[in-house]
Image: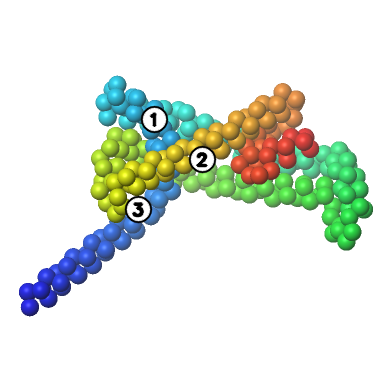
Amino acid sequence: MAADTDRIGRIVLFVLVAALAYAVVLMAQPFANALGWAAVIAIVFHPVHQRLEARYGAVRAASLSTAAVTVIVVVPVLLLTAVFVREAAQAVVVAQQAYADGRLSWLDSGWNVVQRKSIGAIRIDLAAAIVDGMRQLAGLAAAQGGAILQNVVLSIIDLAMTLFAVFFLFRDGRPLMDFVRRVLPVSPAFREQLIVQVGEVVSATVLSAGVVAGLQGLLGGLLFAVLGLSAPVFWGVIMAFFCLLPFGAWVVWMPA
């Protein structure tokens, strides 16, 4: 009888813990995006934060690291988004004008040669398809940017939540990782290896892919501005995006 009572008690406790965990997940779900970005930022900036923490202590170092994230990441991204949305419509107008003036006729000529040498190729108006694709891309970008600008309050709350979480991840990173180490049901050696590999993968992905693509987009945008081409920020962002894919920035700068 006592064994049955203990078993029922354990089942009830397990159900309560599961229900509480589910409630916590539901409460955190609206902030999942902000918490995810905060975790990525905390991992990438962790080496710098460690040096600040050794010199200034946990709280001051967390404040300095959060301020650095705001200046280095958040402010440039906000400014870039605003300029990108503004230049998206301008890029479509310029492309349409170039097509109307016949400046894209060389694309049609080259494409016609390729189609004539291809057996059973589908006849496609390449220049018109490019302009239409650009129009759709710019429209999508403008729509997304407009949605962001229309929901300024929600965007500010999301951004504030990200920075708020970043601060506490910096400040309480050590106790949090100690808790993670206790709950991971693996051997200590494999646990430490897993934690190190996850951190290295996240940092390498952001730094190698994101920074390199950003630098290529920045250089491409600067080149567009020096040559007097319109919408340099828009095309710089597009080049950075293509650098994250197997295509590369040449998809934009070669036609330009």
For disc 3, the neighbor class at 10 Å (few under 14, some 14 to 19, many from 20) is few
**Above-or-below relation of 197 to 27:** above
Task: Quarter of the image for the N terminus: give it.
Answer: bottom left
Q: Quadrant of residue 98?
A: top right
Residue that badge 1 annotates? 47
Horizontal side of residue 218 vs 201, given as left or right? right
The one nearer the camera, 192 or 150, is 192
Farthest residue, direction bottom: 1
Residue ID at (85%, 59%): 122
**Visible in this render: residue 222?**
yes
Residue that badge 3 annotates? 28
Q: Amino acid at mark 2?
A: Thr
Horizontal side of residue 36 vs 135, given as left or right? left
Colouring method of the image: rainbow
Where's residue 252, x and y in %?
72, 38
Residue ID at (26%, 64%): 19
Q: Nearer the viewer, mark 3 or mark 2?
A: 2
Residue ID at (29%, 21%): 55
Is disc 1 placed on a helix, strand or loop? Answer: helix
Q: What separation in Å lies between label 1 and label 3 (alpha carbons)?
A: 27 Å
